[in-house]
Amino acid sequence: DEEDDDGRSNSNNVRLLYVFCLVLVLLVVFAVVVLIRWDASKRYEPEIFVKHIVFENLYYQAGNDESGVPTDMLSLNSTVTISYRNRAAFYAFHVTPTPLELHHFQLKLASGKMEEFTQPRKSDRTVKTIVAGHQVPLYGGIPVLVDTRPHLNRISVPLNLTFMVKSRTDILGTMVKTKFYGGFICSFTFRGNKLGESLNLTNSCIYH
């Protein structure tokens, strides 16, 4: 009887060892697969290009801020066109951008919210975003507008367009993710005689 008990015990031990080894091998294979997929996802950073901006209108007039202080007011409406490309063969990107903001040095003139979207694998899209400002108080922040008030078609104003795009891909549900963050600063000059025309920004943006 003792020999039978020893035999059963040894058999159980072998069986447990087999199960343990099998689980260990499966975990190692799973980890390797996840690492390979994660490494592959890191190789395919999304390609984002700011293509151009169009200023549809710009109005400059005297007015009062919210507290009643007299100052010059600016309203403008523009459309920014951005290209987004997903080169990955196996992953879609979930894209979450921050608002696009238009500044003259530190003075914010306009903003706009780009839509969130999911970009399928090996595909691209063109995204258009309205960037607008309404009755923005200037407090003398753009002196050139004062000098050319009667002739806005002669103005030349340096501007900066800034925003950030977060792209996330889920490698294994919500357990394993890869994220890419892209910040953009586009510096250009708006000229009044170009109102309504497309201003190419392809070579005017810094990606960081």
Image: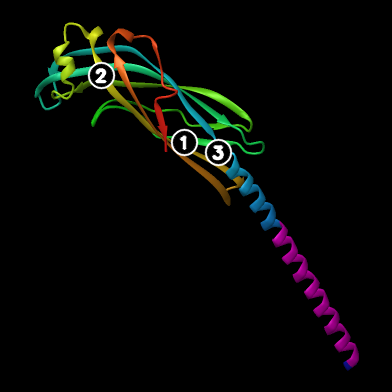
Q: Please determine whether, in this image, residue 130 is positioned above or below residue 57.
A: below
Question: Residue 54's spot in the image, x, y percent?
Answer: 38, 15
Q: Amino acid at mark 2?
A: Val
Horizontally, residue 176 falls left or right of residue 192, namely: right
In the foreground, 92 or 15: 92
First in residue order: circle 3 vs circle 1? 3
The residue pinned by badge 1 equals: 96
The residue at 86%/83% (across/down) is: 8
Q: Amino acid at mark 3?
A: Glu
Circle 2: element type: strand
Question: What is the C-alpha distance between the residues marked 1 and 2?
Answer: 30 Å
Question: Residue 191's spot in the image, x, y percent?
Answer: 29, 13
Badges 1 and 2: C-beta atoms under 8 Å apart? no
Residue found at the very far left of the displayed protein: 69
Horizontally, residue 40 falls left or right of residue 62, namely: right
The residue pinned by badge 3 equals: 45
Quadrant location of residue 202? Answer: top left
Horizontally, residue 56 falls left or right of residue 144, namely: right
Q: Which quarter of the rendering shows the N terminus?
A: bottom right
Circle 3: element type: loop
* Residue range (magenta): 3-29
Question: Residue 45's spot in the image, x, y percent?
Answer: 55, 38
First in residue order: circle 3 vs circle 2? 3
Quadrant location of residue 188? Answer: top left
**Prevailing secondary structure class for the magenta stretch in the rendered image:** helix
Q: Around disc 1, counting alpha carbons within 10 Å, would you say few (fewer than 14), some (14 to 19), or many (20 or more)?
A: some
**Which is closer to the viewer, label 3 or label 1?**
3
The residue at 65%/52% (across/down) is: 34
First in residue order: circle 1 vs circle 2? 1
The residue at 61%/46% (across/down) is: 171
Circle 1: element type: strand
The residue pinned by badge 2 equals: 157
